[in-house]
Every structure is written in structure tokens, then in C-alpha cells.
Image (spheres, helix red, strand yellow):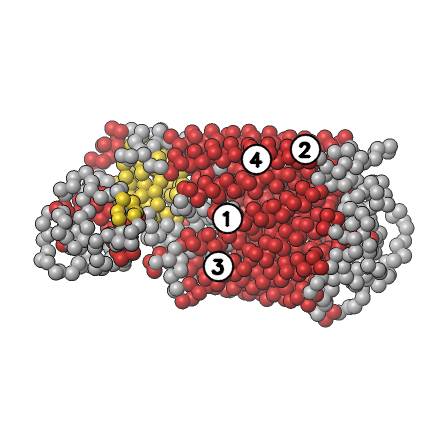
Amino acid sequence: MATVVNPVAERENYLNQEYGVRSWLLTTDHKRIALLYLASITFFFFVGGLFALLIRLELLTPAGDLVQADTYNKLFTMHGQIMVFFFLVPSIPAVLGNFLVPLMIGARDLAFPRINLLSWYLYIIAGILMMHAVLTGGVDTGWTFYTPFSTAFSNTKVIEAGLAIFVVGFSSILTGLNFVVTIHRMRAPGMTWWRLPLFIWSMYATSIIFLLGTPVLAITLTLVIFERAFHLGIFDPTRGGDPLLFQHLFWFYSHPAVYIMILPSMGIISEIVPCFSRKRIFGYSFVAMASIGIAVLGFLVWAHHMFVAGMSIYAALIFSFLSYLVAVPSAIKVFNWTATLYKGSITFSTPLLYAFGFIGLFTMGGLTGLFLAALGVDVHVTDTYFVIAHFHYIMVGGAVMGYLGGMHFWWPKISGRMYPESLGRLAALIVFIGFNLTFFPQFILGYLGMPRRYWQYPPEFQVLNVLSTAGSTILAVGYLLPMAYFLWSMRYGKHAEPNPWGAAGLEWMTPSPPPTFNFEETPLVTWEAYDYGNIDLPKEVPVER
Amino acid sequence: MFDNFPLWPARASTTAGNVDALYIFLVVLSTFMSVAIFVMILAFAAKYRRRPGHAAEQIEGSTILEITWSVIPFGVFVVIFVWGAVIFFQERTPPRGATEIYVVAKQWMWKLEHEEGHREINELHVPVGRDVKMILTSQDVIHSFYVPAFRIKQDVVPGRYTTAWFRPTRPGTYHLFCAEYCGTQHSGMIGQVVVLEPSQYEAWLSGGSTTGSLASTGQALFQQLGCGTCHRSDTQGRGPNLAGTFGKPVLLDDGQTVIEDENYIRESILNPSAKIVSGFKPIMPPFQGIVSEEQLNALVAYIKSLNQNPSGAAGSPTLLPAGTQPQAPKVQ
């Protein structure tokens, strides 16, 4: 199969239809906008990653010796802000979602192609503001902007960074709006709600959070900016304000934002696992409804970030209980993915290795969430490295693993080229090992009591910090490797077949890369998603071994 | 370099053992669940790997299984929830008769004051086996009082009191950390809690010099600020008689009732018109910006002390002529 020259390579597609900078910057093609986003978020991923490495290097020794205290505080602040708002939140929705939502439902484009381009421009304006804030002094409030530190005490670029995040939020809102309308109105004939791929369900759930949660973040940041500029006294206790009000408002968005980051990855895993085990997904409707359940319940648990903040005991009880409720749909998903493997015919290709990595690390992230939701234990471990480890297992072990799995799964569709499979598997292994070495020791550090955001620390914490720093360098290699071979494959990779994995799904029924309007003719859907038993597909994943 | 490499934190309070017990339960449960899922994935991956003569078998799903693996985890979660809540209730309910320590946090130090009037910075001496209640406030941003060996943590919020308590069980020196990011020297805002045997503690107390107990400092301040002009020990004052009121319900002029706790006293000094006691007029001037956090603590301690000796200083005749306005303090 490898020697077969692909006759459709020179065929007109979305990549070669037009050339030149102008054809990219003014495009309204969802696939080209996805690539614009891919380039932008990759840039911010490496900026945020560089800050992370500097943080880890500073923590190699107990003394604060590599950078100044103020510099360290800016590093962890900007690492968080850039990774959350400029990488994780847009990552899968704006890149893979943008590329795949129309393809997967058999549409020619998103419902509002120009608004789609606008959302990228908003992202870029916000990105320029953020980089300007970074380069002209940075910001040191922590990504959480807690008042009254951010409003009355910090001497850094709080307003500018707040403004950047305010603007990037509108980019999310417009993307969410576009997806909701597209999924409702533009499904191909026969593509009923219960035939939708689970990635679409997860994008739908994510979009609901974009639309309902992000405006609250915008309001909160506006209040911080106004309070800082005009001393309004909303959060300032000396003027009758309440600093805890800020925390309620902030987490009302920022807890659902965690689900913005993880739901899309769950959607990807629900695509990869059936494909590489040649089986329909176990419990389709439960997996789909679990996404919606997470999106809804995710709005009701925000104050579990505030158990020691000075809140009433009774409020804490309610939020603790609701936090356990939201763990149920996550558990359902993990069990269903595992059950999907049962009696499958499994091929260990790169995307599946990332999916296994996701399931393992997300399970550990989810289980350690049970520790944090338990009130008595949370008092001890909140604001320590235990929390850092927990949310990195969810956001990096979960969300980023899922993103990388998705990028490997759909890269042949996006670029029309295959990446080197053996290097792909190697990178997945390096990421998995590096990740665990970086973050597992932090659970122990946290229970020992090392607080987060510490520039220097007592010497008995050093051994675990050295392990963590060592892991982070391995992780960095694991992230650079796919970047290198993806770029290499764009020129030297083998041409991809329309359906290199023999996967179900409309996106695989059009050439790789797809033509500008996606399909030669509008598809008619007569089957359920992942119906590997009935759709005419290869019995095995057609890759050479 | 690596001679001190602990994997478990010191356990030095009555709460610590309870927290550790739930933590260990959770570690065992999580390990079991993770291993179960990893083993299943690896076993399926090995058993059902692609090979000649083997094809996937299509299975739609199973509602019974879905219900099983929703209900059983939920049941386990409820157990964890209740267990965690019980510990939390205990952590958040200071026992009666606890020794009180007033803590003022500021960028970047801890200022602690004992009832006996001993002041400490970044260091707290307490006797083993006695309940200690911390009454915490901040002068600037939010901090968090964290003693890992006691498994307690409480945010310290400007503009209000929060409380925490512990009973040390083992003499020793333990870390005191600030756990809420508070600016440049956040990681330098650390100190130690020194737990002493009762006899050593008595020696420590008698060794230090004080200017009298916190309540007596408060009493002097009460007179200096002219509070006694209105808050008299009889019913003739223009303000309510404060003797014996702490911890009891107060009827307000809007018909609501509040419990007179530290936060109520604090608010009534700084912003008196916020909650007016029924039958009185809002004539007291606000003391926001006039009294420091330490002075406020002394006043609170004094008013609380009136419960023990109701005929205390509030009853002493005012030294100020009637009609004199309260004055800004000249203390400090």
C-alpha cells in the first residue's frame, strides 16, 4: 500500500485552492481558520511552556536563586493565564472543532463563516495585548486575579492582562455561538441527534459553557479593571466591598472552564477508541448525555474552590455534595471507554496510545478530585502542590493528551500527509513518562504541605522538586517531537488516503485534504455513529505494521 | 543535601489523625480503582489485539451495567462526602473555653497576640494538650494560615474575622505557612509554631514581658476613645450596655436578630450604623481608619471579657465630661 502513488495528491483542495498571505488572512473557510488557530495556539503553548520550564528550574533548589521573587510570581501568573486562556480553552474547539464540526455533520462550512474569522481576529488582538503586557513588565496576580491584591496592591500590568482575557473571551463566545447554530441547523440529511458523532456532542456541551459562562468572566474582569482604575470599592473591604464576592464570580466561570478544557478531549477519546478497536462505542447515549450532564452540573460546583476562604459551613456542605455529583458522569465515560475495548480488535496506533494515556491520567486526576471535594481533606491540601498536581492531571494529562491524540488522528485529514508512526508512538510514550515524573511527586509534596506559588521552600521538599523538574525536561522533549515530525511530514510525509484508519464518520468520506466545500455532494446518512459492524469499512485499521 | 526526605507530614494535632484516616482511605480506594481500570485496559488490549482470525464483536451497550457503574460509585461518593463533612464540622467548630490567639496578617508577616498580652512575630508558642482558637484578620490582602502538621488551614481575609482551632498533641516545632498568594514575599511569609510541655509553656509565659493582658489593653483603649461615655454599665447610656452580651442574640431595630460574635463587634466599631440595636439611635461615629487591627482586637477581647466580670470597666464612671467627642487614638 505504501508504494501506491496517490493519484488525488494534485487534486484541488482547501490548501492549494488559493495561495498567498491574503488568501489566508481573509479566508472564511473553517478549515483554513482552524489552521490559523493551530499556528496561534501553538505559539502560545510554547510561550507558556517556556514559563513552566523556568518555574521548574527555579524550584530545583530550595533557595530563590535563579530569578527574583517578583519575576517568579510573574512567571507562574503568565504561565497560567497563557495556558488557560490562550491555549487550553481555544485548543480543541478552535482548531479541531473548527476543522471537524462541519465535516462531521456533512455541512459545507460553519453557520457564520465571517464571524468565525472575526473570532480568530479577536483572539489575535487579545494575544497581542497579552504579549504586550508580558513584554512590558508582566503581571503578578496569579491567573486567578484575587482581590484585593489585584485591585489595590499589585504594581503590575493587571488592567492590560485583564483586558486581553476580556477580549479573548469574546472569541470563545463567538465560536460557541457558531457551533451551536451549526449543529442545530446544518446537519446533513439523515444525521439525526442520536447519530451524531460523540465529538459533536462534546463540542455542543462545550459551546453551551462558552455561551453561558464566558460572559460572567467578562463581567468579573470588567469589575476588576474598573475597581483598579476608579477605586469603586466593590471588592475592597475598607470601602465596604467584599473580596469573597470576586472569588464567587471568578469561579462561576473558571470552574466550568475546566470542563471547557476536558469535554472536547473526552469527545476525541470517544472517536479514537471505537476506531482502533473496530467497535461501536459502548453505551453511546450514556456517553453523549454524560457530556451534557457535566456541562450542566459543572455550573453548580464553583465554590468548592473556596472551602477555606471564609464561607459558611453549610454552603461548603452543599458545594461538596454537588462536586461528588459531577464526578458520576465522568466515571460513566471512563467505564464506557474501557468496555468498548472488550471483544474489539485492537490496533496500537499512535492515537490509541494517546487515548490510553488520557484514560489513565484522567482517571488519576478524577480520583484525586475526590480528595479535594472531601471537606476535611481539602482544608489540608487546598492551595498546596496537591491541587497543582490534580489539575495538571486533568488539564495536561487529560486535555493535552486528548488534543495530541486528536491531532495525530486527524493530521492525515488536515494535512493530507502521514506522520512517521514509530516516532509518533515514541513521542506518546515520552509524554506519558515525562508527565508522570513531573506531576506525580507533586501529590506527595502537597500532602507534606508545600504551598503553591512558593518561590523558595524549606529544604526537606527538595528531592521531590528535583524529580519534578527532571520530568519536565522529558515532557518538553515529548512535546517538541510531534511538532518536529508534523512539520517534516507536511513536505516529506506519505500522501494520506481519504480514510487511512478505516474510520467511520463523514469526515473520512471525503478526500484528504478535503476540497474547499468539504463534500462533492451533500452526504445522506443512513447509519448510526461508529456502526463498524454494518458500514462498509475495512475489518482492520489499514496501516502497515 | 538530601538527608531530610520525609514522605509523610508530622502529625501533631487531634485533627491530623482524622484527616489522615480519610486520606489513607482515599489513597487505597483510588489505587484500587486505578489499578482495576489499568488492568482491564491492558488485559483487553492484550486479549483482543488484532490478529488473524479474530474480528471485533459489536456490542451496543447495557443499561444494567450503566446503572451499576453509576449507582455504586455514587454510593461510595456519598460515604466520602459524609466522612469529609464530619471532619470539617469538627475543624470548623472551636470547643468552648479554648485559649484565644489574635492573629493579624500583613504583607509579609504574622503578628500574633496572646490573651495574656504576649506578642509574637512569625512564631507562636502554645502548650500541648490545650485547645487553641485563632481569631484571624488581615491588614491588607488575603493570606492563609496553614500549619501542615495540624492539617489546618484558614484564609485570612481583610475586613473580617475568620477563625480556626487546633489542639496540639506533640511537642515540637512545626511550619507555619502562608498558603494564599499575597505578593512578592509570599514564600517568605513563613514562621513556626512551637508546641511546649505545659511547664515549659508557663516558663515561656513568665519569661516574656507584656504591657498587661489583651483585655486590659482594650479597657484602656475603651476609656481613651471615650466609648464608656455612651456604653455605660446601666441602662441610661446613649449606647447599649455591653456587659454580658457576647455570644448572645441581639435584637436590631429592623426586627432582625444577630448573634453578637467577634465579627459583629468589629463591624459595630468600624461601621456602627450597619446594624443598630433596637431602641438606640445611629449616633455613634464610625471608627474605620481610626483604630488599627491590633487595637480592634484589644477592644474585641475587652468586650468579650465583660462576660466574665460584668462589673468591669464598662461600669467604671466615665472620665470624660459629657458631650466630649471620641478622639482619635494616640496609641502607637
From the image, tell me which residue sits under label 2: B64
Query: Could you tell me the amino acid type at mark 4?
Result: Phe
What chain does mark 1 sit on? A
Query: What is the spatial separation of the Cα atoms under label 4 and label 2, in whole angstroms?
Result: 15 Å
Query: Could you tell me the amino acid type at mark 1?
Result: Trp
Secondary element at tag 2: helix
| Identity of the residue drawn at 81% across and 36% down | B56
Q: Is residue A18 above or below residue A192?
A: below
Query: Could you tell me the amino acid type at mark 2?
Result: Ile
Point out the frontmost of discs 1 and 4: 4
Query: What is the spatial separation of the Cα atoms under label 3 and label 1, in whole angstroms?
Result: 14 Å
Where is residue B314 drawn, in percent x and y? 15, 47
Where is residue A545 drawn, in percent x and y? 83, 40
Query: What is the spatial separation of the Cα atoms under label 2 and label 3, in whole angstroms?
Result: 44 Å
Point out the frontmost of discs 4 and 3: 4
Residue B197: image quadrant is top left
- How packed mark 1 is, by other alpha carbons closer than 10 Å (few <14, some 14-19, many 20 or more), is many
Residue at the farthest front position: B255
Residue B125 visible within the image: yes
Mark closer to the chain start, 3 or 1:
3
From the image, tell me which residue sits under label 3: A220
Secondary element at tag 3: helix
